[in-house]
Image (tube, helix red, strand yellow):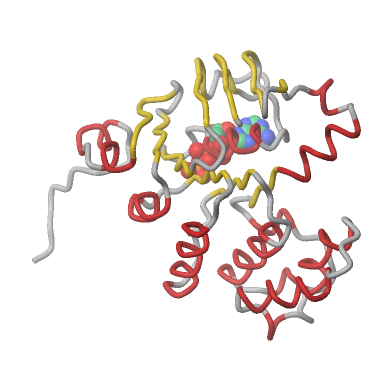
């Protein structure tokens, strides 16, 4: 489903964030992206959603190179945007409606789904947002915003689900719901997280990114997450000097 060939990502007038990134992700795989702050996890997810583009190398989605020119093909762009759903790390960035209800219903209404209102009510209930439906999205707490952002994307049942630190801000009950939901999904999932426990729970494959480099590891979750030396080198674990009793 996804093929990256020698992808280099970076912002203008800045050194490369990621280079030489080559990998494939098959339909239905569940993959966690790990790496220290600022290594480029969000940028990579944004590239997979075609919100930013590689400086060099090729990103193919279902065999088609995803380029600015390709996205100008309106039919293809619509189908791509319909397939791919990204939940941002900072969910406020996604909200533009007056109420929680309109925010959840916006996507299904735009797609002309006749059951848009029913679906919105169901997803609001799934994510514990029913009591907040008439509130403005910006008035919600951090965890409520995270749940709203998830509802807005999950309701559209994307074929490729991209989640940027989805477990941040969630209370244990919401986190448990999210783990169950992601485990039940058959679609392709790529998520970034700093929680090794969350990655181990939901992902079968882990990619570790090294700052200002590229892929440090790519393998089954148990093997990668069980490699303490690798995790320390990648800045994902700290060798503690002091321990409380
Ligand atoms: N629009 C932009 N222009 C220039 N630099 C940017 C832009 N967006 C992000 N960056 C920089 O790119 C780098 C990678 O950011 P990114 O958000 O992808 O990292 P991350 O791995 O998701 O980090 P974290 O774990 O802290 O969320 C950071 O140094 C960031 O400041």
Q: Write down the quadrant of residue 95 in the picture.
A: bottom right
Ligand 1's quadrant: top right
Considering the image in quadrants, where does the N terminus appear?
top right
Residue in the foreground of this view, choosing between 148 and 136: 148
Q: Residue furthest left?
A: 245
Determine the residue positioned at 25% across, 32% down: 230
| Picture quadrant of residue 77 | top right
Residue drawn at the location 61% of the way across and 73% of the way down: 127
If the image is split into quadrants, where does the C terminus sit? bottom left
Residue 137's place in the image compared with 28, above or below, is: below
Residue 99 picture location, percent across and down: 81, 74
Q: Tell me if residue 145 comes above or below residue 191 in the rendering.
A: below
Q: Residue at x 50, y 15 (%)?
A: 20
Q: Position of residue 23 (x, y in %)?
A: 50, 23
Q: Image check: 11 left or right of 217? A: right
Nearer to us in this view, 171 or 112: 112
Q: Position of residue 113 (x, y in %)?
A: 87, 62
Left or right, 2 with respect to 173, comes to right
Residue 135 position by quadrant = bottom right
Q: Residue at x 79, y 81 (%)?
A: 134
The location of residue 82, given as percent across then percent down, is 78, 45
Number of on-image labels = 0
The extreme bottom residue here reads 131
- The residue closer to the viewer here, 180 or 175, is 180
């Amino acid at each position: 489903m996804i093929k990256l060939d020698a992808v280099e990502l970076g912002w203008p007038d800045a050194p490369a964030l990621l280079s030489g990134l080559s990998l494939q992700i098959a339909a239905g795989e569940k993959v966690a992206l790990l790496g220290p702050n600022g290594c480029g996890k969000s940028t990579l997810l944004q590239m997979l959603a075609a919100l930013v583009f590689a400086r060099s190398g090729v990103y193919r989605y279902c065999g088609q190179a995803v380029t600015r020119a390709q996205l100008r093909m309106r039919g293809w762009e619509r189908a791509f945007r319909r397939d791919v759903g990204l939940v941002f790390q900072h969910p406020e960035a996604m909200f533009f409606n007056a109420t929680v209800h309109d925010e959840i219903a916006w996507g299904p209404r735009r797609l002309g789904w006749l059951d848009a209102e029913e679906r919105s009510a169901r997803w609001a209930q799934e994510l514990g947002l029913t009591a907040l439906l008439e509130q403005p999205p910006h008035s919600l707490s951090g965890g409520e915003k995270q749940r709203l952002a998830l509802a807005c994307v999950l309701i559209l049942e994307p074929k490729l689900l991209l989640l940027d630190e989805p477990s941040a801000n969630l209370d244990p009950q919401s986190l448990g719901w999210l783990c169950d939901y992601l485990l039940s999904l058959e679609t392709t999932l790529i998520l970034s997280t700093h929680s090794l426990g969350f990655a181990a729970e939901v992902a079968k494959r882990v990619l570790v990114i090294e700052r200002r480099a590229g892929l440090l590891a790519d393998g089954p979750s148990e093997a990668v997450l069980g490699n303490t030396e690798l995790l320390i080198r990648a800045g994902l674990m700290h060798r503690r000097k002091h321990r409380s009793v």
